[in-house]
Amino acid sequence: MALADLSPILIVAILAGIALLYRIGIIIYRLFFHPLAKFPGPKLLAASSFPHAYYNWTQGTWYRQVLDLHKIYGPIVRVAPDRLAVDGSVAWEDVFGHKGNTRPEFPRQPDFYRAGVERENLLTADKPGHRRQRRLLSHAFSEAALYDQQPLITRWVDLLIQRFHEHAIAKREFDAVQWYHFAAFDIIGDLTFGESFGCLQNSDMHPFVSLSVDNLRADALMRFFLFYKRAFSPLISLISKSKIIQRRFQFMQQVEEKTRKRLDMGVQPDGRKDFMTYFLRHNDAKGMTSDEIAGNANALILAGGGAIATTLSALTYYLAQSPQARERLTDEIRGTFKTEADISMRTTATLPYLHACLEETMRVFPPAAETPPRVSPGDFINGQYIPQGATIAVYQWATYHNEANFREPDSFIPERWLQEDHPFHDPSFQTDNKASFKPFSHGPRNCIAKVLSYAEMRFIMARIIWNFDIELQPGWERFIDRALVFTVFIKQPLLVKLKPAKRATNA
């Protein structure tokens, strides 16, 4: 029978059958013959990438599902045909640690950054580029630079406390998440661009800051569509013109404009020392181009603003929900400092319970709930050979909420982080796998702003606790449960009220 003699319906049926057999063949290969077929995990996830892509990049709920998978299948779970979720307890050193010349590096997963339009920066650079850029950037994040930046940071924390006093005197509830964003972005904006965004001054979110928050959803959405670019190719041009994606491009344009404006101001305008002071002072022929500086400014704004606001918001929530922790932290801060002027980034470094509260907050609500993925070069993780090309992802939230790593993992218990000589040390948490806790990642690509972040968070929270008592408003008890993750947490509002502290009144 000639093809021309077949009815259109029969031709369509034959083609559909061929397509179905092809898909069945792919599924059989993925389940039984794929290099990752030996790794445990649900068959549905091994057969198709769609569940992971959908829940991770469009719904923001994947981080919770990964915890359930680790509980069932262990520390290494196959969550997509070519993707493994690896618990931090076994991944940090093998995947992210320093390799030297004896083992190959697990490189960045390029598709993770493909959705972005940013210039090359510390996050996206290859190994030589990363080493070159980090050498220059590190000067701005040294301990000496940190204390040089104290006056600049103090200016904005003073204004935050002033605004909080206005709320407290008016007995007015307000969204703590929003105000922490105001403070964090004003600080990082001033450190990066030589000027704040005016959020605290105007008591309003600057459009630039709103763009940075939209960035997170835009990147996740683009990852989903680019992952299925063949299926969605007719829509890609329309998607790229959508409002949220266009706002992504606007954000990058503004970053570049602000960066070039600050660079034109020179090394140390008006005697102030900010990030650009150190970038320009130490730049050389092997340093960074202006485009690379703009790319790193983008990364600093997103990480320095969002991560600090996330941790401060979560700590405020947990203190409001945990009377014992709130009382112990209050006693430590108000008992240590005679005046508010005594509180600084240097003096708060000696407060063990405050540090324990920050550690515990980043454990139960990590700023980077999902660590940017790596690709296996063909090497071992926890004694298991991982075939070359496999994507490796560590979901920090799942690692820190796994009872295999932490006792009472869902509870906020700062005492687990205290040293044995501290009066509130609890020996029942000595079995916690604290080596699995890496909120700023690990190895040569760990967060360069770790020291600054700790110092800034300690300083802000100490000032708040010294001045105020915090009350969570009714109806906001599920603040944590409502949060979605697109690599980092997208936070819901957190309504609180503040009461002026007696210590602050009498001082």
Image (cartoon, rainbow, N blue to C red):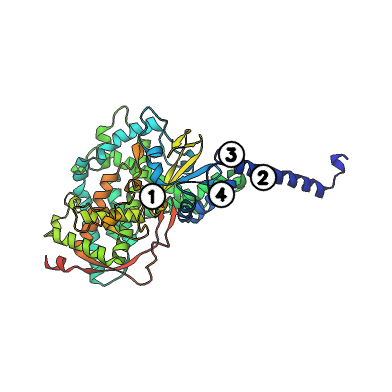
The residue at the point 12 percent across, 68 percent down is 506
Sequence-earlier tag: 1 or 3 = 3
Sequence-earlier tag: 1 or 4 = 4
The CA distance from mark 1 to mark 3 is 30 Å
The CA distance from mark 1 to mark 2 is 36 Å
Pointer 2 residue: 23
Which of discs 2 and 4 lies nearer the camera? The answer is 4
Q: Residues within 10 Å of mark 1 (few under 14, many from 20)?
A: many
The CA distance from mark 2 to mark 3 is 15 Å
Instruction: Report whether 75 appears left or right of 441.
Output: right
Q: Which mark is residue 475?
A: none
Q: Which mark is residue 368?
A: 1
Q: Quadrant of the C terminus?
A: bottom left
Residue 28 seen anywhere in this rendered image of the structure = yes
Pointer 4 residue: 45
Pointer 3 residue: 34
Sequence-earlier tag: 3 or 4 = 3
Can you give x and y, in whole percent of width and height, for residue 93 in the image?
37, 39
Sequence-earlier tag: 2 or 3 = 2
The CA distance from mark 2 to mark 4 is 15 Å
